[in-house]
Image (cartoon, grey):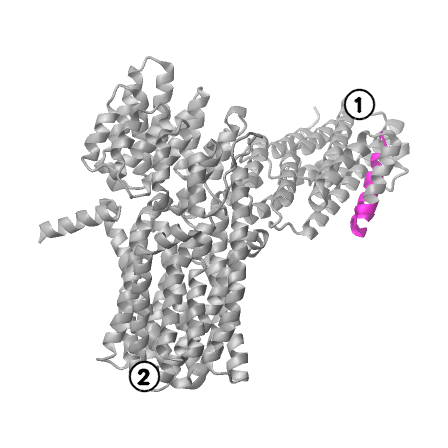
Amino acid sequence: MIYLLSLVKTYILKAFDLKEEELTKTLLLQLNIFLIITVLLIVKPTINSLFLSELSSSALPLGYVLTAITAIVGSFFYDRAMEKYSLNIIMDKTLIGSIISLVLFAIAFSFNLTNGYILYIPYVWVALFGLLTASQFWIMANLVYNVREAKRVFGFIGAGAIAGGIFGGYLTSLLTTFFYTENLLFVAAALLLCCLPITRYIWRNEVVKLNSFQVSSRSAPKGESPFRLIKQSKLLSLIALVIGVSVLIAKLVDYQYSDYASRFIQDQDALTSFFGFWFSTLSVISLLIQLFLTKRIVGTFGVGKSLLWLPTGILIGSILLLVLPQLWVVVFIKIVDGSLKQSVNKAATELLSIPIPIEIKKRTKTFTDVVVDSIATGLAGFILIFFINALEIPSTYISLIIIVLISIWLYFIYHLRREYIVAFKGLLEQSDVKKKKTNKEEIKVTSIIDTVNRVLEMGPENQILHMLQKTLEVKDERFFYTIKNLLNNPSAKVRALAIENLYFLNTENLCVTVQEMIFDKDQQVTTSAFRYLLKNYNQDQIQLFDKYLNVDDTTIANAALVGLSLELRNNQLLQERFNLENRIEKALSQLTFLSSEQEKTNKIQAILEAIGNAKMERFYHILITNINSSNIAVTNTAITAASKTLEECFISVIIEKLSGKETRNTCIEALFFFGEPIIDILFDKMSKDHVIDLEDAAVLVLVLEKFASQKAVNTLIKLTGEMEHTVKIEAIEALKRLKWKYPHLKINDRFIVDRILDECNLYQNTLSVIHSQIIIRYKKNAENPESREENDARNALIHLLELRLDRQLQRIFQFLGIKYPPQDVDPILNTILHGKEEQRIHAIEFLDNILDIQLKKELIPVAESILVETFSEKKLKNINIKVLSESECYNVLLKRKDVKLKLSVLYLIEKINDPKFNSILEMVLEDSHEKVKRKAAEILQTMKKPIS
């Protein structure tokens, strides 16, 4: 028996591309989704039959509308709950709530407590149950596996969902011979109860150990205005429309199916059995088509024509139903819809999205799956209410509406195929940015598979690399042989990326070929080769790596170590099995025996990469040591390796290296690698005085900008408030670039206006202080001349304030560049400052024409004040500037978030040496900046000393 189990285990591992260490969690997840879908396939036919037996098919249209409304409204509150509570709490409550609901429904049905409109509650509930539980399951599965692991195992886990779809319906059909229909809900509740311990076990053992950065990297990005993203892309818009029309038609088909079934089958239990049987049969047919026909259909007819199979099948069935209004015809239509939608149609739609960037696909997927589906469902309900309930048209004639909608569907498919060709051509042009006019034949875009293969065979290097990134997303075996041929490509980048693709494809085991590539001159190729071998090598893998880690060729040994560390990331069991810790220690000990500096550098770089990739906490001190290395190449590798650990302890260490020109870009990329959770951490560091240097804080703005997300925009907006000028100006410029590069990002117009008005007030305030200081100096010199030190200190303050005026002007016009096109606004300040008199007047007139009334009132006087070249008392009197007392001047300046200005004021107070300013100095003792507080305390102490 043990031997048999071992054989089965070995077969599963080989057949489904699994690793022994991940088998337990993978089987548990597969069982979990199997149970969820089984429950759905028990509950759905049960509730449907009870609903139709009681209310008849005429109640279905309202059911569709209520389902759509509940889904859209519910998703809003669900998103809020997801922000407030962790996923495991939400999943726990969903499962417990679902189990209790099933038991309550069963009791209510058993005692005939659900009559009339109350039946809409379980009907809507079951429609949302499948969507919610399946969605939560896949979110958790994405947390359990990293992207690379997910590509390997999700097909196997998904087989559990297919098995559940087959088993659940047939089980329902069988159980109706032993139980009443309503009692099946108790069976469903019992099965769903089994999901609870599985979910809790997976969360406790696999997800809890992840930090916020790992969770973020494995989660789908937050949908930042998916509607805008879809609207901006014609290809995405057409895909959404095609999906929407297909769902609309599917709901009309479902109505006909339910109506005919309820009319032809009067017995409630028999109706439940019928629904259960055909739900499972649809899954079986869909699986058979997926396994044996989908690739051939899509490969032979191309994606565009493959999309026609589903509407054509429904069209034939709908026409046939008008001639032969029989139940078997409706069943035929339902089979066509249910089977082709999840096989041929789904595969073709996924391939059509190749030109769309992966991040945008992730952000819009939920919107398409939930919102578009819900809107189409609601629309189907309204159509049926109007035609069936209001006009009392027989359900057979719904086929006429379906035929009309199919013509619209075909119209969109035609335009979708054309737009795909345009998008694909744009993809090729984008990937070949250095393209020059040559006689080389342009690759013609026809069917997707052929075009991808032709690009990989004939395209220039940039296009091939770009396409290999795209094929890496879709994982399609039809590209196998074309990609295999790229192993001989002259470009090392192409060879490495080809191996990356082949890692996920199983048409043929290429270990013999790939093993030869271990001797490739490029380390990236050899690293990829080692990763491939670690997954596909049929013999002793540990012996294989022992062999190559101990070779004299350090390039191969280094690549073997890096490849091993990449493949063993987050897998403690595998790390122990391959004795990775000892291998790194051995590599470290070898450093002393290397005579060549270059060999030493290469070896330490490989060690650092291995530590970062494998997240070896024991060696983190080596990363920190080498981040401070005198060798820039080693420093940059250490920084990148530190970011790969996704450990928060390295963030401050990386930030300290931002100021170095040779490490700056590496640091920016490293911090960006942490993902969006780092945004809040960086903001906290930037907003607290003395946590990081001002220069580093300014560079961190570039990290925030790199995210190009709404969260990054909101954080940059905060940084334009009470921050040092250097940070503020960088944040404003970043906002300006993001506003005009990514129109979907929201920057509130009111915020820009308020900030400009604040800066204008600050400008006027600064002018007032300068003017007041000039008057104070004039009066003092007239009565009792200032000492030289006091005069120098006052002149230094006035000079500094004049420089601050220039900064404030710069910020005002940078803000204007967010509200108005930068090409219009950017030259104005330079013209006003440095242009000839006539040009300056024209520039102010131009401003007067483009500004709205509120801005014009505040900004034009500021612009006109710039024309005053020197701030003498006489010229300042011509401007409406408030005169402040000396104490008011200092109070105003010391409240600003400007350390240099505060110190200048304190220096002047020190030279004046007048006790009347003691109260001001005592106020400064509460300042957040340590240097400012210390200076104020020193002056106070000096003033309070008794005169000897």
Determine whether, in the image, residue 474 is placed left or right of residue 561.
right
Of the numbered discs 2 and 1, the one sitting upstream in the chain is 2
- Packing grade of label 2 (10 A; few <14, some 14-19, many >=20) is many
Q: Secondary structure at mark 2?
A: helix
Classify residue 946 by image quadrant: top right
Q: Position of residue 592 (x, y in %)?
A: 30, 16
**750 to 818, vertically: above or below:** below
Front residue of this view, candidates 90 and 932? 90
Determine whether, in the image, residue 462 is placed left or right of residue 161.
right
Mark 2 vs mark 1, foreground winner is 2
Residue indicated by mark 1: 787
Determine whether, in the image, residue 170 is placed left or right of residue 779.
left
- Magenta range is 849-870
Q: Is residue 220 visible?
A: no
Question: How far separated are the C-alphas under marks 2 and 1?
Answer: 105 Å
**327 to 437, vertically: above or below:** below
Magenta-drawn stretch contains 854: yes
Magenta-drawn stretch contains 347: no
Q: Secondary structure at mark 1?
A: loop
Q: Quadrant of the C terminus?
A: top right
Which disc is residue 268 wearing? Answer: 2
Q: Position of residue 182 (x, y in %)?
A: 30, 80
- Residue placed at 37% from the left, 58% from the top? 343
Front residue of this view, candidates 130 and 669? 130
- Residue placed at 40% from the left, 64% from the top? 131
Residue type indicated by callout 2: Gln
Residue type indicated by callout 1: Ser
Determine whether, in the image, residue 687 is placed left or right of residue 782.
left
Front residue of this view, candidates 877 and 835? 835
Classify residue 51 by image quadrant: bottom left
Which disc is residue 502 wearing? Answer: none
